[in-house]
Image (cartoon, rainbow, N blue to C red):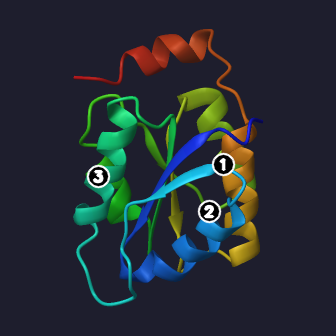
Amino acid sequence: MSTQLKIAIGADHAGFAYKELLRDFLKDFQVQDFGAYSPGSVDYPDFAHPVASAVENGEFPFGILICGSANGIAIAANKHQGIRAAICWENEIASLVRQHNDANIICIPARFVSEELAKEMVMTFLNTAFEGGRHAERVAKISC
């Protein structure tokens, strides 16, 4: 994988520490941080929407979003056309959402996975290709 890969990252207060960890972990890539910029209480849509918009408009091929459960941030991101934000809590899921769903944003539940698993899932997500074929037909049916 090219270290020139551009990645958008964002988190709310519950995901702030993991965002910082992952941003540093991905230092060899071109990572743009969309906040939050402190662990103070914030609203997850304020970070999900800018990351999803950046992926939606093609500025970034992939995004990473983190909140406590990953549910809120995934719901907000998935409001954007062309966004397939997937909640991952195991490495195999991070692989399958790329292979079968062509997910373009990984959503990590910071309260439920270890830091090491979060790093492993991100690398799996970024390194796994979409299989296409019958999966492409299904993905094409997602947009309204």
The residue singled out by tag 1 in the image is 93
Query: What secondary structure is marked by label 1?
Result: helix
| Local crowd size for mark 1, using a 10 Å CA cut-off: few (<14), some (14–19), many (≥20) | some
What is the distance, in whole Å, between disc 3 and disc 1 at their CAs?
25 Å
Callout 3 amino acid? Pro
Foreground pick, 78 / 2: 2
| 84 displayed left or right of 79 | right
x 56%, y 75%: residue = 20
| 100 displayed left or right of 142 | right
Callout 2 amino acid? Trp
| Local crowd size for mark 3, using a 10 Å CA cut-off: few (<14), some (14–19), many (≥20) | some
Image-quadrant location for residue 10: bottom left
The residue singled out by tag 3 in the image is 50
Whether residues under marks 3 and 2 lie with C-beta atoms below 8 angstroms apart, the answer is: no
* For marks 3 and 1 on the same chain, the one whose residue lies earlier in the sequence: 3
Residue 89 numbered mark, or none: 2
Residue 85: percent from left, percent from top? 43, 45
User: In the rendered image, is residue 123 in sight?
Assistant: yes
